[in-house]
Image: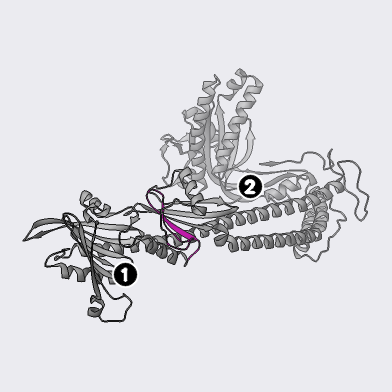
Amino acid sequence: MNMNSSGSPDVAGKPPFEPTGVRTPPAAGPEAPPRRSRHFRVDVGTIVSAVALAQSLLLVSLGYWGSQRLVSNIGTSAHRANHDRIEDKVLAFLAKAESVVGAIGSAPSLSPAGEHVDRTSELLWTLLQQSPELDSVYVANESGQMLMALRYPVPAIRHIALGADFTTETWHYKRPFGAELDVQQRFATQRIESFRSSYDPTRRGWFQQATKTQQPTWTQPYVFAAAQELGVTYALPSARRYAEGGTKALVAAGDVSLGRLSEFVRLFSSNGYGNSALLSADSKVLARSDQPGVLHKLEPPSGVLGALHEHMVADGTAGGGDDSTFSFDFDGQRYLVQTSLIPSTGWELVSWVPEDMVLGDLRRAVLWGLLLALVFLGMALFMSLKLSKLVTAPVENLSRIARRIGLLELDNLPREPSRVLEIQHLDQALDDSARSLKAFSKFVPVDVINQLVAEGHSLAPNGAARRVTVMFTDVGGFTSISESLPIDVLVGMLTEYFNLATGVFARYGGVVDKFIGDGIMVLWGAPADMKDAEYRACLAALQLHAQMNELNRKWRAKGLPEFRTRIGIHTGVVIAGVLGSNDRLSYTAFGDVINVASRIEGINKQLGTQTLVSEDTFEGLKGRLSTRRIEELVELRGRQTRMVLYELMTP
């Protein structure tokens, strides 16, 4: 690795520097160093501030966007939780009604007439008392006989018997449900009334629907005959076998008025945000919490409920089986909406809430947080600009000093005192560097100091004994190849070959000492000690052959000749160091080991081999690579004794 001086330090294009201690005005031309330094300082401050501002704004924007999304998710989740709570209550309400009717239908002695009628009456009355969800419970058979327990309009047990020409109704009036009486007194009959009517239970929709489907069913809303109020009925088909009359179809049922359903929905909606409504399968309002009173007729949705229903119809989600979540605008206000289907009835539960009611406080808090963040950002930016001015001016002066040191103008360098600890350290480090380089310049030419310092070598001729592994390479038949090729082609091939070879040697720790025509001298173990130098050198040789095979294939495809590299490797002690005159130095190695390695490389031509290593190198391999011993002792040119050589085998 040669280190040669090349030219004077006063080269063309060298930037001018002002003399020490003299302050001159900045030059007007674009190449004046003070103007460039000032622009550089300003640009650094601007860039740092711009980057800090951009990053801060990005973080604030992402934080605001994330906060808004979080707020929206919180609002949607809160409204969804409230909707789910109401849905659970509605399902529990309906489930309670279904369980009561199911208990009636599974009673063994269930009968609307005959010997078991008293037991059935007591059962219906007891279950009605325990089920505030229901307005009445009853049972009817296919003969038109019916037994009903009513809560409204008055507590009573209603007996119905269908005759040939008319229906006979007998009402047993009971005490009010809230009376503080014992069980027997509450069931005691206060008075009895009988009258004729045209009521036929077998023609009622709940009876016909249950007997036709033979499945439990919820009816569509209709007017109750006794209460004259809108409601729905849950009907359960059953059958009983009687000794006197054989098997008869029975239907057990329970009534829920829409007024009671509305009270229920209003009760649970009032515990959360917004309002809720129940819509029938044909999109009529069954119950809604935003309007007081009892529904006396079925009507389509109106107001906010009507607007959101129109939105659902337009989107195709009205009456769908899947739950949906959406938002819409009505009357200048935005609403969050949740819908779900009540499976057993086909009803749809709809809940809505003004978005500002749920998210208003949170969004205002986010906006205040954003404003505070922007204020703090502005303050931080202002302070950073102020502080940067306290730093950039000394740094500008230190940069001028560093450039003078880089060009080795080391006389009369100014100092830059500062209260900033880092700048003080930098000033001291630059001063130390300048004094060190000034000392080096007394012994070594100025134009090679940078290279010597970078290489870490001594600045005076010296040498030391080192055990190294030396490799010599040569291209077989290069003379004939060079005579057959144009110069530019030959130079290109050599450059590509040297680039490949030096890259391989560098990967395995080798230091290229010099190029000798088409040959290369490489050292392992100098200038720094290296363990396993023999093994690394042999690996590099094998890798070089492998990569040369690829390069030769490429050249062959282009019609170019191939390079056949021959390699010789030897290990021993050499003198290595910086050698030369006062104005021209070179780091190299010399000694018998160098000559032997060169001779080993040359013997490849005689033996027809590619890579030969000495016995010293072979011992360092310790059997880790495949080798072949050259059986005949080889005589090297210029040496009295013959040597044992080994051929390094390519895998």
Q: Is residue 426 above or below residue 531?
A: below
Tag nearer the camera, 2 or 1 = 1
> Residue 370: x and y, percent?
66, 60
Looking at the rendered structure, which numbered label has been put on residue 154? 1
Q: Is residue 163 above or below residue 608?
A: below
Looking at the rendered structure, which numbered label has been put on residue 45? none
Residue 203 visible (yes or no) = yes
- The one nearer the camera, 70 or 327, is 327
What residue lies at 28% left-to-right and 58% top-to-bottom? 234
Residue 29 left/right relative to 490: right
Q: Main secondary structure of the magenta part?
A: loop
The quadrant of the rendering that contains the C terminus is: top left
Discs 2, 1 touching: Cβ within 8 Å: no
Q: Residues within 10 Å of mark 1 (few under 14, many from 20)?
A: some
Three-letter amino acid code of the residue under disc 2: Ala
Three-letter amino acid code of the residue under disc 1: Val
Q: How many marks?
A: 2
Residue under numbered circle 2:
576
Image quadrant of residue 93?
bottom left
Residues rendered magenta in the picture: 271-294
The quadrant of the rendering that contains the N terminus is: top right
**Which mark is first along the chain, 1 or 2?**
1
